[in-house]
Amino acid sequence: MVDLSQVFLNSLVTGSLYLLAGTGLTLTYGLSRFPNFAYAEFITLGGFIGYVLVEQKNTPFLLAFLVAFIVAGLISALAYGLIFQPLVRRKASLIHLMVASIGLGYILRYGIGEIWGWSALSFTISWPLYDVNTVRITGLWLWLIFTAVILGLALHALLTGTKMGKAIRGIATNPELALVSGVNVERVIFFTWFIGAGLAAAAGIFRGADARLTPMLGWDILLPIFAASVLGGIGNFYGLIIAAYILGLAENFGVIFLTAVGLSTEYRMAIAFLILIIVLIVKPQGLGKK
């Protein structure tokens, strides 16, 4: 028998992870206009920083979360300044920027592998378990859902109620107009790369604490994160919120379907991408755009 309540809860957890990870990708794409494949490695970096601090330094999880956010954000902003900003100034094409991001990703991935090794690691931190009728939830899942909710509220407040948020929306909509209006475009882009990688690291520490930690951690979930961003209307934060939870539902109900027909649950990603293809055929601009 399938416990639908548990499936919906698992979908909420998966969607919250995709929302947390996809927000940074959506923000950086909205301003930089190219898919940053190195984003996966910032997810991985967050997981490993969290592991070192929590497991080896006995740092409280919340403090490790903040340190991972800041360190990943600083490395990302530095990478933008040293690699991508010069390329943009030289009018590099989309392909050049994508290839540069892939190269940066390989450097970060194999650097992580050399520092921490390629064998799987696991957090040993114990999380409380809560049973509500037939539904079981861990303290880690509650923190993940809570973080996703706070993120949504904070990003909404940032985008609608601050000068920085209005600048972000202005650059995403019309960068030339934002520039002539006096917006410091480069400063805003540096800010979004810092925040974006910080959110990636935050997703990574949650993912690492909930699953095995390897240098491929971020790469393993990069495709559904891209799918959620595209499905929501690439660069659109509000569309991403809807898309993240749709894909969370698709994956978890897909596991039930695949099990019922005797197929490997590894195919669950295919179900999410099938939904993506169908939606984009009907509405190519994604769910979050008119």
Image (cartoon, rainbow, N blue to C red):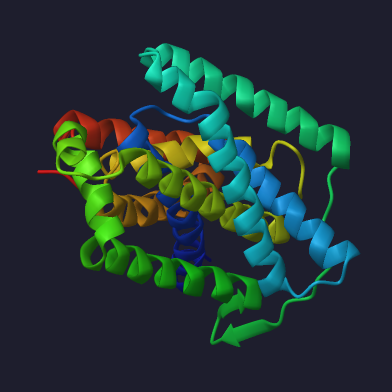
x, y percent for residue 180: 15, 36
Residue 217 vs 111, above or below: the answer is below
Which is more toward the observer, 5 or 277? 277
Residue 56 location, quadrant = bottom right
Picture quarter with the C terminus: top left
The reply to whether residue 3 is in sight is no
- 127 to the left or right of 18: right
Residue at (23% x, 68% y) in the render: 161
Residue at (36% x, 32% y) in the render: 32
x, y percent for residue 220: 62, 37
- 112 to the left or right of 205: right
Which is more toward the observer, 21 or 62? 62
The reply to whether residue 46 is in sight is yes
Residue 138 vs 89, above or below: the answer is below
Residue 79 location, quadrant = top right
Q: How many marks?
A: 0
Residue at (43% x, 55% y) in the render: 19
x, y percent for residue 120: 84, 44
- 106 to the left or right of 6: right
Which is more toward the observer, 22 or 167? 167
Residue at (55% x, 53% y) in the render: 198
x, y percent for residue 14: 50, 57
Farthest residue to the left: give it.
290
